[in-house]
Image: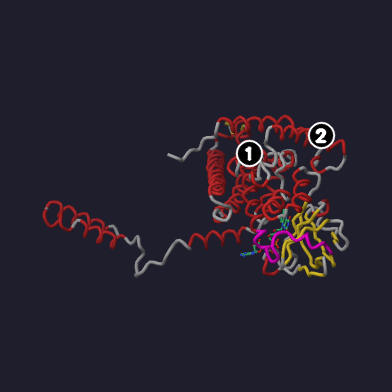
Amino acid sequence: MAWDFSTEPEFQKKLDWVDDFCREEVEPLEYVFPYAVRSKDPKIRGLVKSLQDEVKAQGLWALFLDEELGGPGYGQLKLGLLNEILGRYPSAPQIFGTAAPDTGNMEMLAAYGTEEQKERWLKPLLNQEIFSAYSMTEPQGGSDPNLFRTHAVRDGDEWVINGEKWFTSAGRVADILFVMCTNGMFVVPRETPGVEIMDFPAMHNHVRYNDVRVPHDHLLGPEDGAKVLAQRRLGGGRIHHAMRTVAQVKRAFDMMCERALSRESHGKVIGEHQMVQQAVADSYAEINMLRLLVLWTAWTIDNSSTQEARTQIAACKYTCAKVLREVTYRALHIMGSLGTTNLTPLQAMWASAPTMAIADGVDEVHKVTVARNVLKDYRPHPGLWPTEYLPAKRQEARKKYATLLAGDPDLAAWADHAERSMARGH
Ligand SMILES: Cc1cc2nc3c(=O)[nH]c(=O)nc-3n(C[C@H](O)[C@H](O)[C@H](O)COP(=O)(O)OP(=O)(O)OC[C@H]3O[C@@H](n4cnc5c(N)ncnc54)[C@H](O)[C@@H]3O)c2cc1C
């Protein structure tokens, strides 16, 4: 019997270590030195590095990468269990070398880079000596690649890139930008002349590429291969977001339950009011549905490929946005006025729910993917009635028993009576 929802004791020990480490080391660092993981200050970098060294010593660094790509090869299921802890702490993914957008970019480099490209970019990215950004979305075309215009033209030993990108997260502070052109994926050092980063938005940058020249070996993967590389990148990224969302909703749920037992109103603790109980019960079920969907998807990737799991990944993408929206809203509501302030994490978590429904492709697009792929396994029913039309099924079943009924009047009378009763029910 292969259905097993337990965690190997050895790996559980690792998870317990991660849980303690995040609570005792990562969380305090976040409160005293917010955004330390992105700081270039040598003293602050030292604090971050000492935590990262502890993670490396545990063999938990860059867990998302398969062994042949340079990681420990734990696979997506174990990464899912790990992310259920890391997702509670904003800087934990960076401390464990599993933070977007670098993870997806590293996956592309690991899978499609030449040895020289890996040496030049993958190694320093893995060691967080440099940071990267992913420049795909365009202002006029969103993330529909058929509407993209950014294009590279070969000129001698160089590529000349022209175009405009929108919402390149952390582009301003990245050392290299992965630029999706209509004819390939290019690695562009941010300092290259012609890379123009607009003042707004501040974090997710609007970038113009004006006659940007890069050497010919800055093309990653084959010419015209950008869509395949992007799919590889985004497939992994979406499931990682979903894994971290499980952590977020559990955190909101913990706050909801603690409050339900701590606050009194109208003669009882609020956890005894039925509507609060409904919020707890619905949230419990929704969180576990999401968690099982995410872990099943991770297991599918481990046992086949990201491509094979694409329907499940798409389902994870919009389900995590929905569960985040529902559960954080209920938790915030049960927290009352305090929930509306920034004195607990709930207000920020609730505000992030609409973002989750847009980043990495809007929910609608993923729902279309799921519906299309699911419907491929179905066929229209041949006649007027659906396959499950009961009178037709009964008639068919009766044929199976025809000989028996012909030879036994009692059974025939019983079956006739049942048929008449069923017919009266309509
Ligand atoms: C926090 C965050 C970080 C991001 N980081 C990056 C990044 O690092 N690099 C990058 O390149 N991009 C990034 N993006 C951009 C992201 O990929 C796009 O926002 C997303 O793909 C949607 O594109 P859009 O914003 O142009 O929305 P649009 O495509 O304009 O969609 C707007 C709305 O139109 C409707 N709609 C659109 N398409 C369909 C459809 N096919 N069917 C039905 N309805 C539809 C939906 O209601 C949708 O919400 C990021 C986005 C966010 C929110």
Which of 291 and 229 lies nearest the eye of the viewer?
229
Is 220 a magenta residue?
yes
Highlighted range, magenta: 213-230
Which of 248 and 377 lies nearest the eye of the viewer?
377
Secondary structure at badge 2 equals helix
Image position, residue 217 (x, y; %)? 78, 60
Image position, residue 61 (x, y; %)? 70, 39
Tell me the residue at 63%/38% (across/down): 82
Which of 425 and 32 lies nearest the eye of the viewer?
32
Q: Is mark 2 within 8 Å of ligand 1?
A: no
Q: Which residue is mark 1?
A: 82
Split into 4 quadrants, where in the image is the C terminus? bottom left
Q: Which residue is mark 2?
A: 47
Is 28 a magenta residue?
no
Disc marking residue 385: none
Q: What distance separates the C-alpha of mark 2 from that of mark 1?
A: 22 Å
The vertical placement of 87 against 370, above or below, is above
Which of 303 and 209 lies nearest the eye of the viewer?
303
Split into 4 quadrants, where in the image is the N terminus? top left
